[in-house]
Image (cartoon, helix red, strand yellow):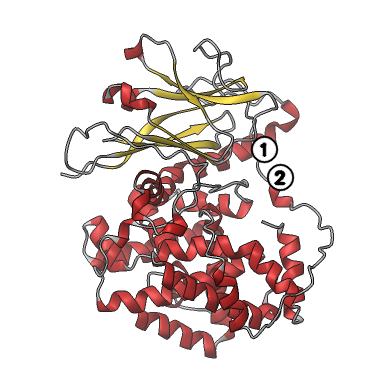
Amino acid sequence: MLTPAELVWLIAAVAKGDEAAFERLYAATRAKLYGVVLRILRRQDLAEEVIQETYVKIWNSAGQFNPGLSSPITWMASIARNRAIDVVRKRTESSIEEEPAAMEVAADSPDPLARREMTEELKRLLECVGRLEPDRQKLVLLAYYNGWSREQLAAKFETPVNTVKTWLRRSMMDIRECLGL
Amino acid sequence: MEYSEDHIAIAAEYALGTLDADERAQVETMMAVDAEFTAMVQSWEFRLGVLNQMVGSVEPRPELWERVRTAVGHSSQQAPLMLPEAPPSPQAQAYEPTAFDPIAPTGPIAPAVDNSNVIRLSSQARRWRGVASVMTALAAALVAMIGVQLFSPDLLPASLRPKPRTQVVEVKTPAPAAAPAAQYVALLQGAAGGPAFILTVDGASKNFTVRKVGAPPVEAGKSYELWLISDKLGGRPRSLGVIGGSDFTARTVLTSFDSDVINGGVYAVTVEQAGGSPDGAPHSTPVFAGKLIETVPAAR
């Protein structure tokens, strides 16, 4: 992976229509974004489709990237993850238990989870998540990493959906307060 | 504009991803008409987005690039791009654990030795203690995937199967019970309080994996070696092997130990000569250590 500064430079070049920079950006970030969306979608075909749409959006909106607001990879991952969540929410509405086996199948590279050390921002966020009760820590992290709906979380925690709803809201407000937002 | 708590909560949950399709559409509509609300949603997305640092990369199929390129309307190969020299990321230096301070595995955290850095280290240690309290949940949220990939590679599509250098171990040991077994996690931490490795153990197969998180690279000519220390083993540390140079090591050595030894023991990492201790005994004090915590209880 390139450094954040190199990625910022590439995105700026992409914003000017530089196709070679776009290819370089894709090469540097595809595995990370694919890892993020595959965790949520758990299907190669859907994940590939989402990645394709993600890079089209990156190509079209590179000029809107503001390095003052987020790191390049966080910005790109947000686009990818949002798209993946949209897809999975529309699917789960028809049937949550559509693919029980697929629930177990996903992808984490055996390779570096955190090859590089956590950033200060991550440590700060984890510190705040760590202040939640243990069950709620898990709730928030499973929601984020696996893209689970409230219904799936309710099943996992053997708790009514409305309780999960309350917990999620409370947890996010607690995190907000902890972060000083 | 001052937003109500309902607005703030729905922005946060949008970023978290737990809204249903209708609510997501509602948020997107609000974003389309309200730039300030959009900024709030994005700020949540970016705050939470750092969590993706912990997600492993997965290489997509090479064909995907062709699809992407076609979709954005590019045609042929481009000349290779020369990148300017960029300054190193300041974030890369964010965490430098005082890794080689000896610690008592279950005792209090040893004081930092470098007095000039006491203030910096103690605030860092405080932060790490805060972070450490979430590591169990973090490991649990990430653990299911590792388990499947390592132990049931057949379940994965071809492109996701572990690369050859991952040690995939076939376990013949019969599981004690038919029900899904408990999962255990130990955070192996150093003197600075930061997690260096995450050890996960499957209760039934006794398979374990070691995942490198914050451990610094071991010095040249040395290896990290993992030990199990238990009163029930007469106090003599038993080697669980060298932790590989890759970030992920899977082994089955634990199968020769009883469950209560595995569950009650201390897991410690020492720095040994390259390839591990030659005589089966550790030659340094532990630099990282931790005990197992049950994260996924055994099914009824």
User: Seen in the image, is B16 located left or right of residue B203?
Assistant: right
Q: Residues within 10 Å of mark 1 (few under 14, many from 20)?
A: some
Decide if residue B112 is in sight here: yes
Q: Quadrant of the N terminus of chain A?
A: bottom right
Q: Residues within 10 Å of mark 2 (few under 14, many from 20)?
A: few
Residue B294 x/y as whole percent: 32, 37
Q: Residue furthest bottom?
A: B33
Instruction: Kindly identify the amino acid type of the residue bearing the numbered disc 2.
Output: Gln
Residue A99 x/y as whole percent: 27, 66
Measured in 3D between alpha carbons, the distance from the residue under mark 2 to the one under mark 1, in whole angstroms, is: 7 Å
Task: Give the chain of mark 2.
Answer: B
User: Seen in the image, is B240 located left or right of residue B78?
Assistant: left
- Labels 2 and 1 positioned on one and the same chain: yes
- When the figure is inspected, residue A162 is found, relative to residue B115, above or below; the finding is below
Q: Quadrant of the C terminus of chain A?
A: bottom right
User: Seen in the image, is B61 located left or right of residue A155?
Assistant: right
User: Seen in the image, is A7 located left or right of residue A107?
Assistant: right
Residue B99 found in image quarter = top right
The circle on residue B93 is 2
> How many numbered markers are drawn?
2
Residue B276 found in image quarter = top right
- When the figure is inspected, residue B193 is found, relative to residue B226, above or below; the finding is below
- When the figure is inspected, residue A7 is found, relative to residue B160, above or below; the finding is below
Name the residue: 58% across, 83% down.
B71
Task: Give the chain of mark 1.
Answer: B
Q: Secondary structure at mark 1?
A: loop
Q: Label 1, on which residue?
A: B96
The circle on residue A7 is none
Name the residue: 39% across, 67% down.
A43
Residue A11 x/y as whole percent: 71, 72
Instruction: Kindly identify the amino acid type of the residue bearing the numbered disc 1.
Output: Glu
Q: Secondary structure at mark 2?
A: helix
